[in-house]
Structure formats: structure tokens, C-alpha cells
């Protein structure tokens, strides 16, 4: 899977990130969040800092995923969060 900017996307488990414990505040800054809709397969990047202001930095990735609503088809069941790791330069 490749982001259009060339960032590889993977499940949190692939990065050894536990989405039930990791929060918007604790997730290392190198990670970007992308929402993935199982219904229409749309993927959309999420502004984790803006989300942190709205939901609180102590929100876990699991709770964030539960609140996602697809901007493409409106589906709000089973949406997943994927993580991308920003390249270091
Ligand atoms: Zn959708």
C-alpha cells in the first residue's frame, strides 16, 4: 500500500502499536493517521493534532476509530485506522 506521497501504510499492529493503549498524545510524532472505509475503500488522511484538540489527547486509537465516519459514503461502521511513518531526512 502506498500513500500518494510515498508513505507506506500499515495496521498499527505492524508497527507494534497497541491501538487500545496508544493515544493521540502518546503516539510518536513520526506517525500519520489515515482512515480506511471498508464499504467504499476510500482512504483519507486524518489531522491527528486537530483531532486531538477535538477529542482530547488521551483518546486511544481504538476510540478514535470508532468515531470515524467516511466522507465518501457516510459509513461509520468498521472504519479502520492505518498508520503511516513519515520518512526521516
Ligand atoms: Zn466509505
Image: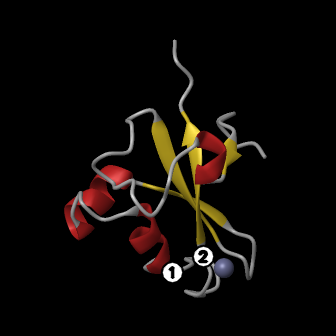
Image height of 41 relative to 27, above or below: below
Q: Characterize the local packing of mark 1: few (<14), some (14-19) or many (20 or more) Cα atoms within 10 angstroms.
A: some
- The residue lying toward the viewer, choosing from 24 and 21, is 21
Image height of 20 relative to 4, above or below: below
Q: Residue at 25% across / 69% down in the picture?
A: 55
- Kindly check if marks 1 and 2 are in contact, taking CB atoms under 8 A apart as contact: yes
Q: Residue at 60% across / 41% down in the picture?
A: 15
Residue 38 percent across, percent down from the top left: 72, 77
- The residue lying toward the viewer, choosing from 79 and 71, is 79
Q: Position of 86 compared to 11: left or right?
A: left
Residue farthest top in this picture: 89
Q: Is mark 2 within 8 Å of ligand 1?
A: yes
Mark 2 secondary-structure assignment: loop
Q: Residue at 78% across / 46% down in the picture?
A: 1
Residue 49 percent across, percent down from the top left: 30, 51
Residue 16 percent across, percent down from the top left: 57, 43
Ligand 1 placement by image quarter: bottom right
Mark 1 secondary-structure assignment: loop
The picture quadrant where one finds residue 21 is bottom left
Q: Residue at 64% across / 85% down in the picture?
A: 73
Pick whichever of labels 1 and 2 is earlier in the sequence: 1
Work out how far the residue at label 1 is from the one at label 2, CA to CA, in angstroms: 7 Å
Q: Characterize the local packing of mark 2: few (<14), some (14-19) or many (20 or more) Cα atoms within 10 angstroms.
A: many
Color scheme of the displayed model: secondary structure
Q: Position of 1 compared to 77: left or right?
A: right
User: Disc number at residue 78?
Assistant: none
Image height of 67 relative to 3, above or below: below
Image height of 31 relative to 40, above or below: above
Badge nearest the viewer, 1 or 2? 2
Residue tagged 1: 69
Residue tagged 2: 79
Amino acid at each position: 500500500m502506498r500513500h500518494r506521497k510515498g508513505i507506506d501504510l500499515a495496521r498499527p499492529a505492524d508497527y507494534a502499536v497497541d491501538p487500545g493503549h496508544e493515544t493521540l498524545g502518546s503516539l510518536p510524532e513520526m506517525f500519520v493517521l489515515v482512515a480506511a472505509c471498508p464499504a467504499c475503500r476510500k482512504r483519507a488522511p486524518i489531522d491527528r493534532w486537530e483531532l486531538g484538540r477535538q477529542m482530547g489527547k488521551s483518546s486511544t486509537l481504538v476510540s478514535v476509530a470508532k468515531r470515524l465516519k467516511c466522507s465518501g459514503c457516510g459509513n461509520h461502521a468498521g472504519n479502520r485506522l492505518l498508520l503511516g511513518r513519515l520518512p526521516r531526512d
